[in-house]
Amino acid sequence: MFDVLSRMVHTGILTDASATDRLQQQIRSVLGRALCIRQVDAGSCNGCELEIHALNNPYYNLEGLGIKFVASPRHADLLLVTGPVSVNMEEALKRTYDAAPDPKLVVAVGDCGACGGIFGTSYATRGAVSNVIPVDHTVPGCPPSPQAILDGIFQVVRSQL
Amino acid sequence: MHMATTVLDRTRTLLAGNIAGERIAANAEEWVASATALHGAGARLLTLWGTDDRDRDRCFRIYAAWLHAAGLVVLEHAIEDRTHPTYPSLAELFPAAGRMERAVYDLLGIASTAPDRRGWLRHNGWPEDVFPLRRDFDATRQHAVQSLPYAYVEVEGDGVHEIAVGPVHAGIIEPGGFRFSVVGEKVLRLEERLGYTHKGVARRFQGMPQASGHKLAARLSGDSAVAFSWAWCAALESIAGVVCPPRAAALRGLALEHERLANHLGDLGALGNDAGFAFGLTQFSRLKEDLLRLNAEVFSARYLMDFVVPGGVAADLPRLASDRLYALYAHLELAAAELRSIYDEHAGVQDRFRETGRLDRDTAVRLGALGLAARASGIANDLRADHPWAPYDRLDAQSAGQNGGDVAARVQVRFDEIFESLRLCRMLLAELPEGPVRTAVDAAEPYGMGIGVIEGWRGPVAMVLETGPEGTIRRCHAHDASAQNWPLLEYAILGNLVPDFPLINKSFNLSYSGQDG
Ligand code: SF4
């Protein structure tokens, strides 16, 4: 146990405090509670997921911002969708979208989610997420940095003010 | 092995690639006999793919590649029946071939003799009489999805019930289907259904300029971008007869080890978390982020999607990068050593890791396990040690090895590999050759074939490249060791409890996108 404590002390607090506070306030003023996000990989190469995962590390400290990932679309304020939407995921994506409560905010993450990326559209892909469900905001990049994804989420939240 | 029935002892063509290999033509009988001989000799199936060559010699072709002591062997079987192209299945000998054969059928309409005819990559998103890799396929056409249920194998018995999961999962994970047959909470059977992220990569490659293929290769699986793009470039360079400059080879090695480190650090955190030890996730995800941030400084990107390019790498290290890198390695080494003893001594964590998701050596051998998962079940295999290519040919990389076959063993392999990777990184940096980091690669001759095989963090990734006229790609087949290793998970889960599935699954952490293609 001592090891664990000493490592914790050693690591300290890594999050950038002022930016965090601002975002947290905005989320609270819009929702009055934590923002719930459901992530949907609709066919990505997994690169975008890695950067979405990074949002949970102590540098970005998503939970501390008042944002959490939820397991069901029914509890989601926002869907964070990566693409390109594969033909084999088209139906599952639509179903997830239908299950989400209004206002069904959708952020399409990555070049693939935004425009189809290097895969484009083909017999196997529908390309951009917006070809399958309505999208409120896109975050380009391959993969986009965690900061860019956070900014994207932030923009959509602000648009609801 | 009978001389009259196997071709292994005669006609051989050298195979272009980064590790030694030979290519052997076989008729249907020889196809089976040679595969049997290879099986007997302990060769491991690397990949299996098909081609439509009707435009050239009115044939379809089926290929299979094996890894064995001397390197690679590729068997090539031309199929003359163009109406009902068929070949003998290898799935009885090499169980992993079963799904690969189903994938070949979905893309090319070349059928194996195996009884399982269910679509693997095709989930009724295109008509069943349309084959995307046939040369007369209309690539611009989009088809409506026809929603039909998948015929999972039914398990009958008293008190058995089914739990279906996916394709969308609860966490931030790639999509896939899992069907558990359980009694109480105990798993009697697991059947996977993959293919959800199939993006038609092989078709996308077709006709693409050779000069840009590495970009698509890197995006087969974002967590293995360096491995795939390197394999692709190795295939192209071997056909074009280009040798990547020594400094570039060393930098590729550095990038590949960074990729291994990043994934292992991420996995170790997630595994701790799945075992109820959130502290592990906090610590390891922080270390991973430290590495990615330094990647952004020295390689200009957190994830090296476009670093490995034909003929070398995109850019040299910036000035003073070595100091920053050495400092990072020291930081990671210290922290990983400390965290390893914390994990090792944490009773709760060890209780979850030990004896959970055990895959014994015999099963792993029979299923043809490769890479990290095989190394945790007592099978020594690591291309960096067994068939080293530049720069590994001067590094004496040590393969990790554990015998337990459980989650604990897969955790230990990751720890061992972190320390070995750090050693390799330091060596690469200390002995970084002078000189250019890129050389020109002219358009390769048409109809050449080359294979790049690179030991990614999960195991070998392979890129088979066939060149077309005027600097284009005629055919490219990508393979991730996940294809072999997904069936291992179906065995490792047996007799375990359903709630342990996320932990066991994470301990393998196989690629969906890499297998779906
Ligand atoms: S944008 Fe890049 S990282 Fe994201 S899914 Fe597409 S190829 Fe992968």
Image: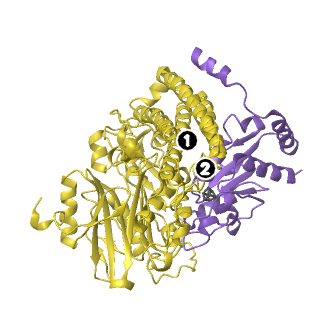
Q: Is residue B191 visible?
A: no
Residue nearer the viewer, B512 or A36: B512
Extreme-top residue of the structure: A2
Report the amino acid beneath label 2: Tyr
Report the amino acid beneath label 1: Ala
Q: Which residue position is annotated with label 1?
A: B262
Residue nearer the viewer, B181 or B109: B109
Q: Which residue position is annotated with label 2?
A: B303
Chain A drawn in what color? Answer: purple
Residue B270 pos. (x, y %):
55, 37
Whether the residue carrying mark 2 lies under 8 Å from ligand 1 is answered with yes
For residue B217, above or below residue B136: above
Pointers 2 and 1 within a single chain: yes
Residue B496 pos. (x, y %):
40, 37
Tell me which chain appears yellow. Answer: B
Q: Is residue B452 visible?
A: yes
Residue B114 pos. (x, y %):
29, 66
Whole-number angstrom distance, CA of label 2 to CA of label 1: 9 Å
For disc 2, the chain is: B
> Which numbered circle lies on residue B438?
none
